[in-house]
Image: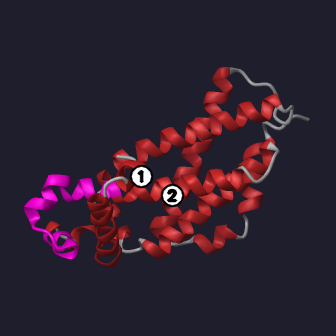
Amino acid sequence: MSNSQVSKDPVREEILSKAAELLGRFGFKKTTMEDIARAIGKSKSALYYYYKTKEEIFEAVVAVDMDENRRLTEEMMATVETAPEKFRLMFTTVFGNIREKIDKFSVFRADVMENPALMENIGKERDSYMETLLHDLILYGIKRGEIRAMSDEEISVWTKVTNMTMRAIGQRLFLEDNFAYVEKHLDFLAGTFLNGIMKK
Protein backbone atom coordinates (compact mmCIF):
# COMPACT_ATOMS: atom_id res chain seq x y z
CA MET A 1 0.00 0.00 0.00
CA SER A 2 1.35 3.38 -1.00
CA ASN A 3 1.74 6.40 1.23
CA SER A 4 -1.03 8.20 -0.67
CA GLN A 5 -3.44 5.34 0.01
CA VAL A 6 -2.58 5.36 3.69
CA SER A 7 -3.08 9.13 3.95
CA LYS A 8 -6.64 8.72 2.59
CA ASP A 9 -7.50 6.43 5.51
CA PRO A 10 -7.08 8.20 8.88
CA VAL A 11 -7.34 4.93 10.81
CA ARG A 12 -4.50 3.32 8.87
CA GLU A 13 -2.52 6.52 9.24
CA GLU A 14 -2.98 6.44 13.01
CA ILE A 15 -2.11 2.74 13.21
CA LEU A 16 1.15 3.26 11.32
CA SER A 17 2.03 6.41 13.24
CA LYS A 18 1.62 4.70 16.62
CA ALA A 19 3.25 1.50 15.37
CA ALA A 20 6.28 3.49 14.17
CA GLU A 21 6.64 5.01 17.64
CA LEU A 22 6.42 1.63 19.36
CA LEU A 23 8.70 -0.14 16.90
CA GLY A 24 11.23 2.67 17.18
CA ARG A 25 11.24 2.41 20.98
CA PHE A 26 11.01 -1.33 21.53
CA GLY A 27 11.90 -3.02 18.24
CA PHE A 28 9.98 -5.57 16.20
CA LYS A 29 10.31 -8.53 18.54
CA LYS A 30 9.12 -6.75 21.69
CA THR A 31 6.25 -4.85 20.09
CA THR A 32 2.99 -6.83 20.01
CA MET A 33 -0.29 -6.41 18.16
CA GLU A 34 -1.87 -5.82 21.58
CA ASP A 35 0.53 -2.93 22.19
CA ILE A 36 -0.40 -1.31 18.89
CA ALA A 37 -4.14 -1.82 19.44
CA ARG A 38 -3.87 -0.29 22.90
CA ALA A 39 -1.92 2.70 21.56
CA ILE A 40 -4.68 3.56 19.06
CA GLY A 41 -7.47 2.88 21.53
CA LYS A 42 -9.01 0.02 19.57
CA SER A 43 -9.55 -3.68 20.10
CA LYS A 44 -7.14 -6.23 18.73
CA SER A 45 -9.87 -7.55 16.42
CA ALA A 46 -10.37 -4.04 15.02
CA LEU A 47 -6.64 -3.83 14.33
CA TYR A 48 -6.75 -7.18 12.50
CA TYR A 49 -9.35 -5.72 10.14
CA TYR A 50 -6.62 -3.45 8.77
CA TYR A 51 -3.50 -5.58 9.22
CA LYS A 52 -3.44 -9.34 9.71
CA THR A 53 0.07 -9.61 11.12
CA LYS A 54 2.76 -7.58 12.81
CA GLU A 55 4.93 -8.20 9.75
CA GLU A 56 2.35 -6.42 7.57
CA ILE A 57 2.41 -3.42 9.88
CA PHE A 58 6.20 -3.36 9.91
CA GLU A 59 6.33 -3.42 6.10
CA ALA A 60 3.71 -0.66 5.90
CA VAL A 61 5.62 1.53 8.37
CA VAL A 62 8.83 1.14 6.40
CA ALA A 63 6.99 1.69 3.09
CA VAL A 64 5.62 5.03 4.30
CA ASP A 65 9.11 6.03 5.41
CA MET A 66 10.53 4.97 2.03
CA ASP A 67 7.92 7.03 0.19
CA GLU A 68 8.98 10.10 2.14
CA ASN A 69 12.64 9.41 1.40
CA ARG A 70 11.87 9.07 -2.31
CA ARG A 71 10.01 12.36 -2.32
CA LEU A 72 12.94 14.08 -0.62
CA THR A 73 15.48 12.52 -2.99
CA GLU A 74 13.54 13.51 -6.10
CA GLU A 75 13.04 17.04 -4.77
CA MET A 76 16.77 17.40 -4.19
CA MET A 77 17.61 16.06 -7.65
CA ALA A 78 15.21 18.55 -9.21
CA THR A 79 17.21 21.48 -7.81
CA VAL A 80 20.15 20.87 -10.19
CA GLU A 81 20.40 20.44 -13.94
CA THR A 82 23.30 18.21 -14.95
CA ALA A 83 23.33 14.42 -14.66
CA PRO A 84 26.50 14.34 -12.51
CA GLU A 85 24.99 16.87 -10.10
CA LYS A 86 21.72 14.92 -9.94
CA PHE A 87 23.60 11.69 -9.26
CA ARG A 88 25.71 13.32 -6.55
CA LEU A 89 22.63 14.70 -4.79
CA MET A 90 20.80 11.39 -5.16
CA PHE A 91 23.79 9.53 -3.70
CA THR A 92 24.35 11.89 -0.77
CA THR A 93 20.62 12.17 0.01
CA VAL A 94 20.15 8.39 0.02
CA PHE A 95 23.03 7.92 2.44
CA GLY A 96 21.94 10.93 4.47
CA ASN A 97 18.63 9.13 4.94
CA ILE A 98 20.54 6.14 6.28
CA ARG A 99 22.12 8.39 8.89
CA GLU A 100 18.60 9.38 10.02
CA LYS A 101 17.53 5.73 10.10
CA ILE A 102 20.49 4.83 12.30
CA ASP A 103 19.24 7.34 14.85
CA LYS A 104 15.52 6.62 14.39
CA PHE A 105 15.48 2.84 14.02
CA SER A 106 18.69 1.71 15.72
CA VAL A 107 16.70 -0.73 17.85
CA PHE A 108 15.78 -2.61 14.63
CA ARG A 109 19.35 -3.71 14.01
CA ALA A 110 19.17 -6.82 16.14
CA ASP A 111 15.74 -7.70 14.70
CA VAL A 112 16.98 -7.42 11.11
CA MET A 113 20.15 -9.38 11.84
CA GLU A 114 18.14 -12.18 13.49
CA ASN A 115 15.40 -12.19 10.84
CA PRO A 116 16.64 -10.89 7.44
CA ALA A 117 13.33 -11.97 5.86
CA LEU A 118 11.74 -8.92 7.53
CA MET A 119 13.31 -6.73 4.86
CA GLU A 120 12.93 -9.10 1.88
CA ASN A 121 9.78 -7.61 0.31
CA ILE A 122 10.84 -4.07 1.16
CA GLY A 123 14.24 -4.71 -0.39
CA LYS A 124 12.71 -5.89 -3.65
CA GLU A 125 10.58 -2.76 -3.91
CA ARG A 126 13.56 -0.56 -3.12
CA ASP A 127 15.69 -2.28 -5.77
CA SER A 128 13.02 -1.78 -8.43
CA TYR A 129 12.69 1.91 -7.60
CA MET A 130 16.43 2.60 -7.43
CA GLU A 131 17.21 0.77 -10.67
CA THR A 132 14.52 2.76 -12.48
CA LEU A 133 15.83 6.01 -11.01
CA LEU A 134 19.42 5.21 -12.02
CA HIS A 135 18.35 4.01 -15.49
CA ASP A 136 16.44 7.22 -16.16
CA LEU A 137 19.35 9.30 -14.89
CA ILE A 138 21.77 7.58 -17.29
CA LEU A 139 19.46 8.19 -20.25
CA TYR A 140 19.14 11.83 -19.19
CA GLY A 141 22.93 12.19 -19.05
CA ILE A 142 23.41 10.53 -22.44
CA LYS A 143 20.82 12.81 -24.01
CA ARG A 144 22.63 15.86 -22.61
CA GLY A 145 25.99 14.61 -23.85
CA GLU A 146 27.39 14.32 -20.31
CA ILE A 147 27.53 10.52 -20.23
CA ARG A 148 28.98 8.47 -23.05
CA ALA A 149 26.73 6.43 -25.32
CA MET A 150 25.98 3.01 -23.87
CA SER A 151 24.12 -0.05 -25.09
CA ASP A 152 20.93 -1.15 -23.34
CA GLU A 153 22.84 -4.05 -21.81
CA GLU A 154 25.59 -1.76 -20.51
CA ILE A 155 23.02 0.59 -18.98
CA SER A 156 21.25 -2.36 -17.35
CA VAL A 157 24.49 -3.77 -15.92
CA TRP A 158 25.60 -0.37 -14.63
CA THR A 159 22.28 0.36 -12.91
CA LYS A 160 22.07 -3.08 -11.30
CA VAL A 161 25.68 -3.12 -10.07
CA THR A 162 25.51 0.47 -8.83
CA ASN A 163 22.29 -0.28 -6.96
CA MET A 164 23.70 -3.49 -5.47
CA THR A 165 26.82 -1.66 -4.32
CA MET A 166 24.84 1.20 -2.76
CA ARG A 167 22.50 -1.28 -1.06
CA ALA A 168 25.40 -3.31 0.35
CA ILE A 169 27.11 -0.18 1.66
CA GLY A 170 23.85 1.07 3.16
CA GLN A 171 23.09 -2.22 4.90
CA ARG A 172 26.60 -2.44 6.32
CA LEU A 173 26.47 1.13 7.60
CA PHE A 174 23.02 0.64 9.16
CA LEU A 175 23.83 -2.64 10.88
CA GLU A 176 27.29 -1.63 12.10
CA ASP A 177 26.68 2.09 12.75
CA ASN A 178 29.98 3.01 11.10
CA PHE A 179 28.61 6.01 9.23
CA ALA A 180 30.99 8.73 10.41
CA TYR A 181 33.92 7.14 8.54
CA VAL A 182 32.07 7.24 5.21
CA GLU A 183 29.99 10.41 5.65
CA LYS A 184 32.79 12.89 4.95
CA HIS A 185 33.69 11.09 1.70
CA LEU A 186 30.22 10.82 0.11
CA ASP A 187 30.96 13.35 -2.67
CA PHE A 188 34.17 11.50 -3.51
CA LEU A 189 32.39 8.14 -3.61
CA ALA A 190 29.61 9.52 -5.82
CA GLY A 191 32.25 10.72 -8.28
CA THR A 192 33.91 7.31 -8.47
CA PHE A 193 30.65 5.69 -9.59
CA LEU A 194 30.43 8.08 -12.54
CA ASN A 195 34.08 8.30 -13.60
CA GLY A 196 33.92 5.29 -15.90
CA ILE A 197 30.85 6.41 -17.83
CA MET A 198 31.40 10.15 -18.17
CA LYS A 199 31.88 11.45 -21.68
CA LYS A 200 35.52 12.42 -22.22
Q: Position of residue 19 (x, y in %)?
A: 29, 68
Amino acid type, callout 2? Glu
Amino acid type, callout 1? Asn
Q: Position of residue 135 (x, y in %)?
A: 64, 34
Magenta stretch in the rendered image = 34-60
- Displayed quadrant of residue 148: top right
120 is higher (above) or lower (below) than 199: below
**67 is within the stretch colored magenta:** no
Q: Position of residue 39 (x, y in %)?
A: 21, 75
Relative depth, front residue between 166 and 37 = 37
Provide the secondary structure element on which disc 2 rests.
Answer: helix
Point 28% across, 58% down: residue:
12
Point 54% across, 44% down: residue:
164
Q: Position of residue 83 (x, y in %)?
A: 78, 42
Point 72% across, 30% down: residue:
139
Q: Earlier in the sequence, mark 1 or mark 2?
A: 1
- Report the residue marked by disc 2: 68
Rendered image: mark on residue 3: 1
Point 24% across, 56% down: residue:
55
Secondary structure mostly taken by the magenta-highlighted segment of the chain: helix
180 is higher (above) or lower (below) than 165: below
All told, the count of numbered labels is: 2
Marks 1 and 2, Cα distance to the nearest angstrom? 8 Å
Quarter of the picture containing the C terminus is: top right
**52 is within the stretch colored magenta:** yes
Question: In the shown orientation, is residue 59 left or right of residue 163?
Answer: left
Question: In the shown orientation, is residue 76 left or right of residue 18?
Answer: right
Within 10 Å of the Cα at label 1, are there few (<14), some (14-19), or many (20+) other Cα atoms? some
85 is higher (above) or lower (below) than 136: below
175 is higher (above) or lower (below) than 79: below
Rendered image: mark on residue 160: none
